[in-house]
Image (cartoon, rainbow, N blue to C red):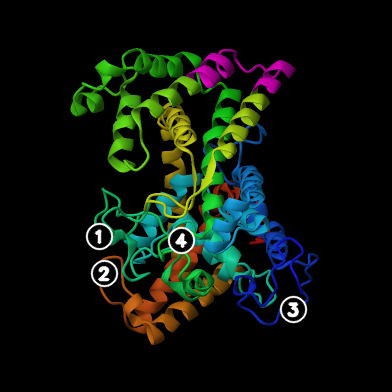
Amino acid sequence: MTDTVSGMRDEDPRAQRRDATEGASGFTDLATGPFRIDRDRIAASPFFARLGGVTQVVSAGGSGLLHNRLTHSLKVAQVARAIAERICASSESAALADKLGGCDPDVAEAAALAHDLGHPPFGHLGEQTLDRIARHRFGLADGFEGNAQTFRILTTTDVRGPSAVGLDLTAAVRAAVLKYPWARLHFPDPHPAGLSVPPRGAAEPDNAPGTGSSKFSAYSTELDDFAEARAPFAGRVEDWQQTVEASVMDTADDIAYAIHDLQDFHRIGVLQHASVAAELGEWARHTREMSTVDDEDLTTEHRRPGYSLERLRRRLHAKDAWIVDDEAFADAVARVRAELVDDLLASVFDGSTEAEQATAAFSSRWTSRLVGGVLVVPSPPTRSGHVTLSPAQWHEVQVLKFVHRRFVLLRPDLALHQRGQASLVSMLVDALEAWLLDRDEIHRLPRRLHDLVELAHGEYAGLARTSPELLVGATGERVSGEDAVRGLARGRAVVDFVASLTDKQAVSLLDALSGRASQPWSDSFVL
């Protein structure tokens, strides 16, 4: 059978699936091309539908005004497909992409739809909380990471594929989801954290030495799937490099994040003209003076207009010397100031047709500009993928993301809200772990949690037999013995279970477990 989009035949290794029993278990695929089938399986997954109830930055509260993880993923997919089609339309870019392993728009779109499946309730704060619990309480060296959880869902915990283990996706799509193509500690060897300039996310976090990479895309339990997905790209891209299609997805995610969250917070009145104008304007007016300010003063007086932006400029020089340029940075500040501050934010969003048109025009204009700056490069530096942005657009994305972080993410009221959500996640884990350890009540566990325990026990028992070197605790000690294996399995199962909830399900389940709910739990666990 031939893929009608790319002309690729099923026997091509990029199109190979893990399970040879395609079409079994009553599963019917409506599409014909292997990569389109993958795209449809992801879109039909309940894990994908769940993203409509998962926070992007702050809870939408039913208003419909803020992006959730589902609407964000749909927009990333739209941008990813546009980038992939742009690459394919250029004979030079298409030839280079083919040499590096291929660039199919269906693969890029499928990966973009899937890229946030592993995000737990309450966005990145829920991710950080689950990671801390997984490592410190359950002794899981892999901890929790949203990208690795995505890969686990696609290959293991979703049951919509023909074998009822994962979605049985092609190698190309599985590889395209690997935004950070390494494990936290073990794989590949040598690990990219050891490079003189590690790829983005491969280095250890500054505040947690010895814990492994801060970002990664596979747990030890999925390394077989990881290796199989990457096999068709051996010799085409380095072990630590993204595939071209993964790089397309990553770039699309950056573009969507830089634009759409700013739209959201303009809509609800959080992103204020005066504060953003002061920050960008003061830096632009006093660029030379700002460059002479001592680093310590920049940190201690970061609230002074212009100081935070100067800190960003210096951080970019420290981390991304391969592309950062002061003139391009100043031009990016000027463009963002003109089109965001002096245009979009100059008028309060009041729900009028005029306001809606201005917001839509801002999004359309910036998306077109950033997609138009996409390049395919044969030999990128370690901190970039083969698909990247031209210097002008790269600097503009950095400034747009800075505005979002400085004037939204660092707000005290958001921090207060998120600390409460972190406490909720911790209490929910406590309650579920207590239930698992209660011998009198364990037979009444939610069926999904019971199944996840059995699944994880089989995985960790298998590692103990075949790859004991991977079975280590959070502090690096070798794990052995049936009780220790069952302890790891319980921990992973609880984390899997909590991570599969929507924000609302997490709140409601904790209410039920703590006796605060007035009615018995009635939400069906479709996940």
Along the line of sight, the residue nearer the viewer: 293 or 352: 293
Name above or below for residue 84 compared with residue 30: above
In terms of sequence position, does the residue under pointer 3 or pointer 1 come before the other? 3
Mark 2 residue crowding within 10 angstroms, few (<14) / some (14–19) / many (20+): some
Looking at the image, can residue 242 be seen? yes
Q: Earlier in the sequence, mark 3 or mark 2?
A: 3
Magenta range is: 337-358
What amino acid type is highlighted by mark number 2? Gly
- Which x, y percent locates residue 218? 45, 65
- At mark 2, the secondary structure is loop
Is the C-beta separation of discs 1 and 4 under 8 Å?
no
Residue type for callout 3: Ser
Asked whether the residues under the numbered discs 1 and 2 touch, taking CB atoms below 8 Å apart as contact, a structural biologist would say: yes
Which-is-in-front pick, marks 4 and 2? 4
According to the image, label 4 marks what residue?
217
Q: Which residue is mark 3?
A: 25
Tell me which numbered mark, 1 or 4, is placed earlier along the sequence: 1
